[in-house]
Amino acid sequence: MGKGMAMGTLAWGEATKGRLSRRETARLLSNLAFVQVREAWDALRSTLGLLRPTEVGIGDLAPPRTSLARDALSHAEETHAPALLFHSWRTYYFGALIARHDGIAFDRELFFAAAILHDAGLTGENPAPLDACCFAVAGGGLARDHLLGCGHGRDRAEAVGDAISLHLNMHVPRRRHGPEAFLVARGAVCDLFGAGHRRLHPRDVAAVLAGHPRDGVIEALRFETAEHLPGSRPGVMTGIFGRSAPPSPFDRPVRA
């Protein structure tokens, strides 16, 4: 299977509405296991004193002042409820902080646009009911079409749409799909579940949470209320995690 039709891409999603085959369901479960193993490894390294993140200062990670970034942010501010918008900002900052810790170079414009719009499919702009199409697929298409309508090039708009559609894979291989898609998934999983938080300095985390608090995030993501397309990535994950809000280390006081 070529990259364009790989599980989670926009082309794949538009052909399937996001419904997984049996093999793809197994791959999603494998991705979830990979995230858990990586987090357990981080926990061990942290306990042994081998994982010591340095403070970055989130001011150094401010999004670029480009037309594409501005158009993405403006659309998010117009369509996202505050709690959902804050989650999108935290996705950007946590992903960027992980990239800095791991020494990953990335296109800040593309990553910011994808991160700030990665849950566009959960807004009132989504024309497809959640039980009819995976919201990441719908959101990727919305973001792509918005950027195209603003006059941005198709390659850039498609890259943003792909990163958004891919993020529900939970783990997105960087070499195959690029660092921007990899970081959207990492930032989103970090904010929702805390995976990767040990790679962030506590003062950086405190600064992100002070500017973009987590209040209302579970309600904004409709984690406990949405009825998703059966057999889609959110449908499978809802079946695994149930309807209770996932625990997060960010819900505890952060030691700055």
Image (cartoon, helix red, strand yellow):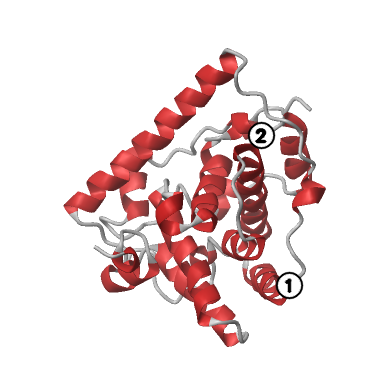
Q: Residue 154 appears at what percent x and percent y?
A: 51, 81
Query: Could you say whether the residue bearing mark 1 is in a helix, strand or loop?
Result: loop
Q: Measured along the vertical axis of the image, is residue 168 above or below residue 54?
A: below
Q: Is residue 125 visible?
A: no
Q: Earlier in the sequence, mark 1 or mark 2?
A: 1
Quadrant (top left/top right/bottom left/bottom right) for the N terminus? bottom left
For disc 1, the marked residue is: 66
**Which disc number belongs to residue 200?**
2
* Residue type, numbered disc 1: Thr
* Residue in the image at 75% along x and 37% along y: 204
Residue 147: x and y in percent read 58, 79
Q: CA distance from mark 1 to mark 2?
A: 27 Å
Closer-to-camera residue (216/61): 61
Side of 106 where 23 appears, left or right = left
Judging from the image, what secondary structure is the residue with disc 2 in?
loop
The residue depicted at 60 percent of the width and 60 percent of the height is 111
Seen in the image, is 185 located left or right of residue 129? right
